[in-house]
Image (cartoon, helix red, strand yellow):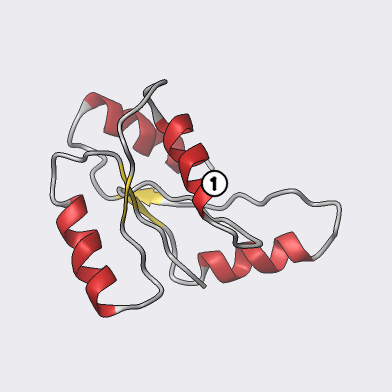
């Protein structure tokens, strides 16, 4: 399993943290996404999709905190039926009260 932290010119310590772990584990690949259009998450995810040749791709934002066994459970569910195209799980946001946007995202995650 490979892990590709996609860094879209973050202004916090995300790049430093991703670089640190990439220096320790050979399966972590810190990816600095080049600037481009359109702006936003969809461009970043599409960029990541084009550099990864994995059979299954899991997507988490940097502020998501999934359960430790979440990826295993989701992949197991995905492989349960060849008609399944994806699986979605629960997560919690660790910075829920930082801004109004993170509060809304955090509240949304509590509804599922």
Above or below, comparing residue 38 to residue 73 in the picture: above
Name the residue rendered at 43%, 64% in the picture. 3
Secondary structure beneath label 1: helix
Task: Estimate how packed mark 1 is, as few (under 14), some (14 to 19) or many (20 or more) residues with alpha carbons within 10 Å.
Answer: few
Specify whether residue 111 is in view. Answer: no
> In the image, is 56 to the left or to the right of 11?
right
Nearer to the camera, 102 or 75 = 75
Q: Nearer the viewer, residue 63 or 18?
A: 18
Which of the pair 74/110 is nearer the observer?
Answer: 74
Q: Quadrant of residue 21?
A: bottom left
Identify which residue is drawn at 86% across, 52% down.
83
Q: Which residue is pictured at 43% across the width and 59% down the height?
A: 66
In this rendering, the answer to whether 100 lies above or below 16 is above
Report how many numbered discs are placed on residues in the image. 1
50 w.r.t. 66: above or below: above
Q: Is residue 48 left or right of residue 24?
A: right
Q: Whole-percent x and y of residue 30?
A: 31, 59
Measured from the top left, where is residue 34 in percent x and y? 32, 38
Residue at 41 percent across and 74 percent down: it is 27
Q: Quadrant of the C terminus?
A: top right
The image position of residue 2, as x and y in percent, is 47, 69
Q: Does any portion of residue 104 appear in the rendered image?
A: yes
Horizontal side, residue 40 vs residue 45: left or right: left
Q: Position of residue 98 (x, y in %)?
A: 17, 36
> What residue would you read off at disc 1?
50
């Amino acid at each position: 399993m490979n892990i590709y932290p996609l860094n879209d010119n973050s202004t916090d310590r995300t790049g430093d943290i991703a670089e640190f772990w990439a220096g320790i584990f050979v399966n972590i690949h810190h990816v600095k996404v080049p600037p481009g259009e359109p702006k936003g998450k969809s461009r970043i995810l599409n960029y990541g999709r084009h550099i990864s040749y994995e059979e299954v791709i899991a997507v988490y934002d940097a502020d998501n905190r999934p359960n430790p066994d979440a990826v295993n459970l989701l992949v197991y569910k995905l492989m349960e039926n060849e008609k399944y195209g994806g699986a979605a799980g629960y997560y919690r946001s660790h910075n829920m009260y930082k801004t109004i946007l993170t509060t809304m995202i955090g509240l949304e995650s509590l509804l599922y």
